[in-house]
Amino acid sequence: MPIAKNNINAEIQTAFVQPRKPQSPPGPTADNFQQILTDNMHQPPHTEKSTNQIIKLGVIDKNTPTVSNLLHQNKRFKDETWNIIFSAANRGKRFRDIRAGSEVTLNLANNEISWHRPSHKPAIPASAWSSQKLTADGLVIVGKISRETPTVSNLLRRNKIYHDEAWNIILSSINSDKPFNTIRPGTTIAINPQTFELSFIRHPRQGAAAKTISSAAEEHLSTAVTNFFTDNKSISQKLVDKIRPYIGRPYSEIDCYGLVIRGLKGLGVKYSGNGGLRETLEKMAMAQGKPLNAYQNGEGLIKAAGKTTFAKTFNHIKHPEKLAEQTFIGVEKSLRQGMILSFSTPSQGHTGVIARDNGEWSYLNSGLIDHQLDRGRTAMRVGEESLEKEIDNWFKLAKNNNEPLEINIGMLDKNKLNNFRSHHAEISHRLF
């Protein structure tokens, strides 16, 4: 069952909630000068409008990558860290999206946390991009998706005008919901120099060719997965075996991400410390200008320690039941025990491991277990649920919240896992 990403985990902090754009104070005009004086006068602590009640907590950086780190390091607020983060004033804030360099403040009147994110530069003057190639609509052509530049971020970071603003542009509200992970090679990427909106331009001939390539790829996907899985079957099956003993443990003790990490540690994978899997995940995030914990989820684990077999973002979901059924049927032939499955929307996310129970595909995870196959009770705990019903749940959730849904499935790759082998664990030598 879907759960919010704002769980508390001593080892992995994955708060994932909706931000509010900080409001800038009014400028000192004649109309509001008196108000500014009033706001800055000393007032009793209960007066919420007092600007004296807004204090700086610190700056998000490598040493303090999360808001909870800043609060924990503050002698005044360390014992109230989680009460502040989960207070009503902060409900819905996307703490996980705060980027390095952001200044974090706290309003003492209501515990509201705000941050100043790097803002976009003013629209780039025509003189700066007049030499750039333009489309018929006056958009600046950033480049074309290819083997050398497989992502939009690659193209933007290579562009002399937009390289410093690459992730600000991609993560902006005007672009954040675009299907970046489904762009085909040969697609031209263009940008509106005034609004920074990105456009994906497919050429007519490319559409037919891409369709043929896509059909062929889907036809051979099951075979490719089978060949890959044969070489990694032992590891993936053992991951299921390492996770199942945790069934029944409360969610407060083991969250969804922590459950998968415990399974990997059971295989002899080094997670924490120098050279561990966590360090690699943090470096991946830093390289893309994201928060350090941005890849501490199922998608990140697949990228760092596995091979993606299915990745798709579903936008504007209107018929969730039908779409869920089509998706399950589409991936069923390529499913294998031990695959990592990650669900993600802008406000929530979840991860777990695919397994089999009495001939039915199941989902080992930690959260609200309400489609259980393990004969346990409905509760917030580690459990084994119907995979098909879990997929259906997430499509319905995304539709009800009017959000896009991203699904990632992947299997462990023993060659990648060798990079994180725990030298003191004998089991790792048998597995890898």
Image: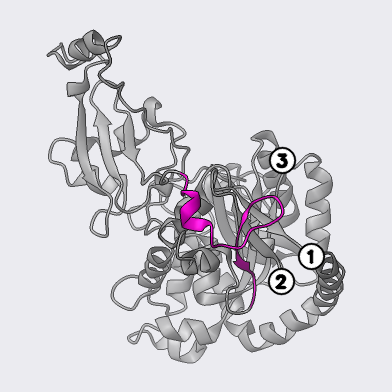
Residue 186: give its label: 2
Residue count near mark 2 (Cα–Cα under 10 Å), binned few <14, some 14–19, many ≥20: some
Q: Is residue 135 in the magenta section? A: yes
Nearer to us in this view, 324 or 359: 324
Cβ atoms under marks 3 and 1 closer than 8 Å: no
Secondary structure of the residue carrying tag 2 is loop
Can residue 360 be seen here? The reply is yes
Q: In the image, what residue occupies the spot 81% across and 63% down? A: 330
Return the x and y of residue 111 as percentages of the image width and height.
Answer: 29, 27
Secondary structure of the residue carrying tag 1 is loop
Residue 329 vs 228, above or below: the answer is above
Q: Is residue 54 in the magenta section? A: no
Nearer to us in this view, 188 or 418: 188
Residue that label 3 marks: 396
Structural distance between the alpha carbons of marks 3 and 2 = 34 Å
Can residue 366 be seen here? The reply is no
Residue count near mark 3 (Cα–Cα under 10 Å), binned few <14, some 14–19, many ≥20: many
Residue 294 falls left or right of residue 198? left
Residue 133 vs 345, above or below: the answer is below
Q: Nearer the viewer, mark 3 or mark 2?
A: 2
Q: State the predominant SS element of the stretch in magenta.
A: loop
Looking at the rendered structure, the kind of residue marked 1 is His
Q: Magenta segment range?
A: 123-146
Residue 113 vs 126, above or below: the answer is above
Cβ atoms under marks 1 and 2 closer than 8 Å: yes
Q: In the image, what residue occupies the spot 28% across and 76% down? A: 274
Return the x and y of residue 409 as percentages of the image width and height.
Answer: 65, 65
Tell me which label, 3 or 1, sits earlier in the chain: 1
Residue that label 1 marks: 203
Return the x and y of residue 410 as percentages of the image width and height.
Answer: 63, 70
Looking at the rendered structure, the kind of residue marked 2 is Gly
